[in-house]
Amino acid sequence: MIRRMLFAGVAVLLAAAASYPVCAAEVQNLVLNPGFEQVENNFPKDWRTFSPKDKENYSIDAAATAGSKYSLKVQGSSDVSWAPVFSNTINVTPGAEYTLGAYYKANVQKGEVIFALREMTEKQESIKFNHVNVPKQTGWGFFSQKLALGPTTKTVQVFIVLRQAPGEAWFDDVILVKGDLPNAGEYAAKIKK
Ligand SMILES: [Ca+2]
């Protein structure tokens, strides 16, 4: 009996040891349809806006990073201050660090480009926005930032919005991972020239 229990214990340890390196090497992107390749009714699947009218500011565009067909094009204007598009709702560990990144291109004259995590309670009440710094003028580049979540944050959504910002911006291959992005060099090398 004891021998059988010992054997079972060793088997569990071996299984845990064998699975660990696989988990450590894989990057689990928490964002659904991160590259905007899946399209439903002319809008990226799994991404939402607060109102149907807000959707007018977003379109699927054929200008995309290497290895993909589409990106998300954001049209900004001086008189639109809050018409965000946002991702699926993601359960997170309160107080933990996550890295948010994306391929991004922009030609915006003024105003504010927001690329951020909306930190929320379990009931999806807003706590704060945690921003990735992106420039108003840039060719395609990979922009990412490690963000420390607040102690009461239980869920997040990725938010994209141009606030009173005439111009255009493009996003592709949005990624959100827990901790560091381990292969940042590969992301920088993937950009379409
Ligand atoms: Ca894409």
Image (tube, rainbow, N blue to C red):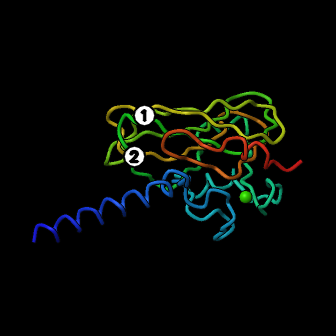
Q: Which secondary structure lies at badge 2? A: loop
Give the residue displayed 29% in from the left and 63% down from the top: 12
Callout 2 crowding tier (Cα within 10 Å): few <14, some 14–19, many ≥20: some
Query: Could you tell me which quadrant the N terminus lies in?
Result: bottom left
Label at residue 92: 2
Label located before the other in sequence (2 or 1) = 2
Q: Nearer the viewer, residue 137 or 52?
A: 137
Q: Position of residue 192 (x, y in %)?
A: 85, 50
Give the residue displayed 69% in from the left and 50% down from the top: 57
Residue at the limit of the structure toward the right, as seen here: 193
Label at residue 149: 1
Label at residue 162: none
State whether residue 1 is above or below residue 33. below
Give the residue displayed 49% in from the left and 47% down from the top: 157
Name the quadrant containing residue 26.
Answer: bottom right
Q: Are marks 2 and 1 in contact (CB under 8 Å)?
A: yes
Residue type at numbered disc 2: Val
